[in-house]
Image (cartoon, rainbow, N blue to C red):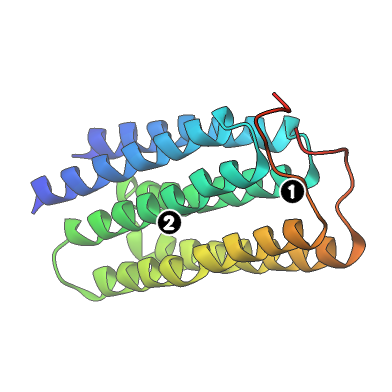
Amino acid sequence: MNIACIVLVSLGILFLVLGAVGLIRFPDFYTRLHAAGKCDTLGSMLIVSGLALYDGFSLTSVKIIAIAVFIFLTSPTATHAILRAAFKNNVSHWTKDKQ
Amino acid sequence: MLDFFLWAAVAILAASLLGLYRALFGPTIIDRIIGVNVIGTKTIAVILLIGLIFKQVDMFIDIAFVYALINFIGTLAFCKYMERKGVHGGPSK
């Protein structure tokens, strides 16, 4: 059980770090949101699921799984809301000429 | 195992420093919103790890749940405000 926990948490940290690097390196608002939204959702869900496996099956792990389900529902919704606010205000996207 | 949790929390905090850079120096307001949202999502995992390190998971789970709720509601409210008022702060890079 501990090995599964370590593997899941390490994978989640890998995804979080890659998403943060994408947040720094990409040239445009939309591409930054592309990196941050998906990598954050998957990384947080992996870490939280790995921590749920640590204690075995109990009320605690059920509540941690509830947090994972909540992240799965709300993080893409927040990403969509941010994207809609930018799109309705005509934030220009990156093209090859502008670099 | 507790050492692993400690180093995992340190790694997540290092990743959230990159989000802090985007929240501080973002070219537009929307970039700052992304940075804050990213930091908030990482903080949920850090709160759970702190609860496991101090062996008080029962208390820290509720804190993490409330933090996830506040993060979501805050981002949504800010986006609604920006959608009505308009995004200022210069053109996107």
Viewer-closest of B19 and B90: B90
- Estimate the x, y position of residue B91 in percent, counting from the top left: 84, 38
Viewer-closest of A83 and A74: A83
Q: Which residue is mark 2?
A: A41
Q: CA distance from mark 1 to mark 2?
A: 19 Å
Q: Chain of mark 2?
A: A
Viewer-closest of B19 and B85: B85
Q: Residues within 10 Å of mark 1 (few under 14, many from 20)?
A: many
Q: Secondary structure at mark 2?
A: helix
Residue placed farthest to the front in the image? A97
Classify B50 as above or below A53: above
Instruction: Determine which quarter of the picture holds residue B74.
Output: bottom right
Residue B80 visible? The answer is yes
- Quadrant the C terminus of chain A occupies: top right
- Estimate the x, y position of residue A30 in percent, counting from the top left: 62, 47
Q: Secondary structure at mark 1?
A: helix
Query: Who's the residue at 27% across and 74% down the image?
Result: A62
Classify A15 as above or below B82: above
Q: Disc 2 residue type? A: Thr
- Estimate the x, y position of residue A19 in percent, counting from the top left: 45, 40
| Same-chain status of marks 1 and 2 | no
Query: Who's the residue at 36% across and 74% down the image?
Result: A66
Q: Which residue is mark 1?
A: B30
Query: Who's the residue at 43% across and 46% down the image?
Result: B46
Q: Chain of mark 1?
A: B
- Quadrant the N terminus of chain A occupies: bottom left
Classify B79 as above or below B20: below
Q: Disc 1 residue type? A: Ile
Query: Who's the residue at 51% across and 52% down the image?
Result: A37
